[in-house]
Amino acid sequence: MLNDMALDELREALKLTQESLAESLHVNQAAISKVERRSDMLISTLRKIIQAMGGELEIRAILPAGVVRINQFERVRRPVIFLDTSVVNLLAEDKNAASFISSLRSGYAVRLTAANLDEVAATPDGNEREHLLDVCRATQGEDDTQVFLPVGDIVKALIAEFERNPACHWRAVRVRLPEYERLLASSELISDELSTEQSEFAEKQKAQFDEMYSNARPQFDELFHSGTEGRPSSPAELVSRLQVRGGAFWSFGMKLYTRAAEPPADEDRIRRFVD
């Protein structure tokens, strides 16, 4: 547990640089340096910095009768919901999408992934492409735009960090994409040339996805047919069976891990990574 640290000491303990923190906050490095030297700042500023480090800010009063958490400065925490590309496409087709999006944002913190914007960029028709981009923009608040790596890329980033530092904390891995957030925050358009490049890249990604995931089912079918037990009755039972030593959960994990790191990992390393 980290205790009694100045902001710069906390940042260094989390192995973050001023530059990476500045990128997450959409400011320059000099602004981070200035804040770290200050002894007085707005609570909202401090909260944003702590959140960019992967944490949450709490304010506590230490009184003779005990410790009290002061909550009046906290924003109402809404559940987080991620929209997949099929939802964005449905919203683009719905004439009443604006009211639905407004209702959705009133109850949820709506987040997007790079996959949403990559698919928009790959749309060949320029007018349709810009309409989809406007829908994505509508789902985000003016000061609360957040775009994240797709799940597969998050796993790769976690693996890379684990390879670099096995003692790392997963919260220290940067999963937001400031360049995508800047695109949504601006009125910038996606050119036809970029759209063509993204479409070609998407085809390659789909081929890799099919190879890794879609072709995995026959392996699991063979596993069940060759065994003495019947098919599991629930996802929890399935995971429990696959996680026995030498189980398919770990062999599949080794394939995923090897795509992001060298040399190939054994089951014990995958177990340490998961833990």
Image (tube, helix red, strand yellow):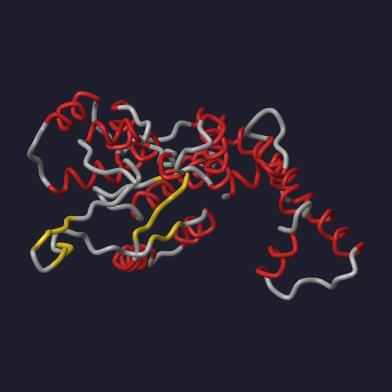
Picture quadrant of residue 58: bottom left
Q: Residue at x 77, y 54 (%)?
A: 247
Residue 178, x across and y down, in percent? 36, 36
Horizontal side, residue 170 vs residue 253: left or right = left
Picture quadrant of residue 19: top left
Furthest-front residue in view?
Answer: 64
Horizontal side, residue 126 vs residue 141: left or right = right
Q: Is residue 239 above or below residue 140?
A: below
Q: Residue at x 15, y 28 (%)?
A: 34
| Camera-side residue of 220 and 161 | 161
Residue 92, x across and y down, in percent? 45, 57
Q: Is residue 119 above or below residue 193?
A: below
Q: Residue at x 60, y 45 (%)?
A: 272
Q: Residue at x 75, y 51 (%)?
A: 214
| Camera-side residue of 176 and 197 | 176
Horizontal side, residue 50 vs residue 248: left or right = left
Furthest-top residue in view?
Answer: 30
Residue 81, x across and y down, in percent? 42, 60
Residue 108, x across and y down, in percent? 35, 64
| Camera-side residue of 83 and 171 | 171
Horizontal side, residue 263 vs residue 91: left or right = right
Q: How many numbered circles are shown?
A: 0
Picture quadrant of residue 138: bottom left
